[in-house]
Amino acid sequence: MVRRMRVQVLILVGLTLFTVFSLTPIVWALLISIREPIDAFSIPPKILVEPTFRYHVDIWLGRGFLGFFLNSAIIAAGTVLVSVPVGTLAAYALSRIQTRASRSLLMSLLVVRMFPHVLLVIPFFVMARSLEMINTYPAMIAAMVALNQPFTVWLMRSFFLEIPRELDEAAYIDGCNAWQAFWNVILPLARPGMVVTSLFSLLLAYNEFLFALVLTGTDTKTLPVAIAEYGGEDLNYWSLSAAGAIGIMLPILTFMLFFQRHLVRGLTIGAVKG
Amino acid sequence: MASTHRRSRLDRRRSLWPFVVPSALIIISVQIYPLAYALYLSFTDFYLGAASSNFIGLQNYVSLLAQDRVWSALRVTLSLVVVSILIEFVLGLLLALALYKLVRGAKLFSTLMFVPYLITPVVAALFLRWVFASRWGLADALIASMNIFPPDWLGAPSWAFVTLVVADIWQFTPFIMLILFAGLQGINPSLLEAGRIDGASGARLVWHVILPALRPQILFVLAIRLMDAFRTFDSIYVLTGGGPGTATETMTLYTYMLAFKQLEVGRASAMGVLTLLVVTGLILMVISVVYRRDKGAF
């Protein structure tokens, strides 16, 4: 009994230490963002100062971050609108056809997933440049769909696999063709899966940096590119860019709270099943 | 009767193939075609701004392989990947076991520890930059307050490497932890009970019972981390930019520099193809291990 208690205490200490390690940089950034630079870096450090939110207001309203947020939102939404419907169709077929051909198709999607992004971004840039599509939404959305499609198919397929095939059979016996069986019977049941898949696609597009750095410009700049430019050495900008960084993080934290139980599935897609 | 039934089933299966077409078209036009184009570019002297380009065969590859900078990038990449993944794996496994043993509160801890993995990588890198920045960063402030002269985290070659490893650990240990924790919860408790009855406990139980049972998850996290660590761009770009000098320049970063700073698109494509070859080699190694040891784990 005593030994068990001791083990529990040891575990608690270890976990607490790592949690502190995980959260310290975030808390530090939050502190920077709500203090005047003079207070934040005075020696000895001042712990208790009047918090100010003027940098939060300034970065979003005065420095154009609201516009960058809009760009991020348009690109992420466009990505989901293309990637998820198309991926859902393919995922349904690949969950029902279980042949050698379909399995090798799924495997090749995994292979596509492992291409280095930096190799893909070069032809994208050259093509977008010759089509005069640099600094446009469609170029960036096309790139994000490319990165998302394999993941979307695998994730949606895992949801379709959970829907018993007897339901398809029943629909066929009732005289449905393949499309009707999919549209009227299976798809309504897969709707929660589509919500989860859409949110993960949204997150991937929202977080993307390399492609946004290369393909977007002044009119289409997304939040990650904008904040990377703001992270300058100049101490006077620290509070401002910390405020921006914290703001960019907030939607993701909300997402996480609501979708915690789907996280593991979203992350392990492509693992054991298949 | 039976044969017509099977027949109709086969027809239905065929009628599903059109569902795959839109997705296949997308993959072909925005993945396969660009890659083929990049491969073609790697055999040309394409330079942004030049009017035309010529086919120059393997010349890009030959001149790249003759560059010290390329070999140094390969060395940096491999050591970053190996060191980070090793530490992350050990830490992630320990944390997963701790969460598994914890009587209550596992959910709270795992949620809190998971935050760094989900936040935008650029933002995560900036958070760390404010910790490791010289003089005003949190790390320096803490160390200096103990009257120790702090190291130059981002400016000295070996410390810059350490900082990048810490950054990788900070961001990706939670991923390994979560997958292994999920795997642990899937282990049949009677298996552990049997191990205990056989007299195994503590480290022996982990080694002989738990690790073998976790093999699919372990191989999965290693394969995924290997792929992702090879193409890490955001955090290195923000934290060190490959510096000081080229001390922390990885293959990915050098490819980016070639293409978008030096505008040598042809040569950059060749560098990207070389990166792809190295990753493919490593992944094939992992997959061959999987298929030999545990058929069907993937």
Image (tube, coloured by chain):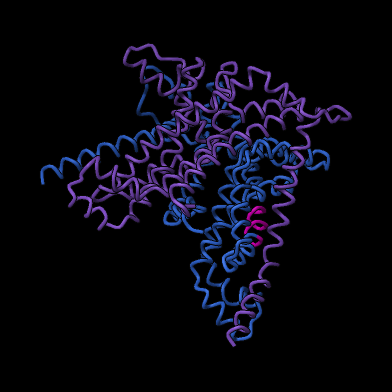
Residue A108 position in % (x across, y down): 62, 51
Question: Is residue A244 something one can see in this rendering?
Answer: no
Chain A drawing hue: blue
Instruction: Identify which residue is drawn at 50% across, 35% down.
Output: B124
Residue A39 position in % (x across, y down): 43, 23
Apparent side of residue A6 relative to residue B141 in the rendered image (left or right): left
Apparent side of residue A7 relative to residue A64 in the rendered image (left or right): left
Q: Residue furthest right?
A: B51
Q: How many marks?
A: 0
Apparent side of residue B127 relative to residue B192 in the rendered image (left or right): right
Q: Residue furthest left?
A: A2
Chain B drawing hue: purple
Question: What secondary structure is the magenta-colored segment mainly?
Answer: helix
Q: Nearer the viewer, residue A160 or A66?
A: A160
Quick check: is A80 in the magenta stretch?
A: yes
Q: Nearer the viewer, residue A170 or A246?
A: A170
**Magenta stretch?**
A77-86
Question: Is residue A197 something one can see in this rendering?
Answer: yes
On the image, which quarter does residue B187 sit in?
bottom left
Q: Nearer the viewer, residue A137 or A148?
A: A148
Residue A124 position in % (x across, y down): 74, 41
Up-down: is A29 above or below A91? above
Quick check: is A39 in the magenta stretch?
A: no
Residue A94 position in % (x across, y down): 60, 64
Up-down: is A197 above or below B172? below
Up-down: is B122 above or below A252? above
Instruction: Identify which residue is drawn at 65% across, 43% down.
Output: A67
Q: Residue furthest bottom?
A: B1
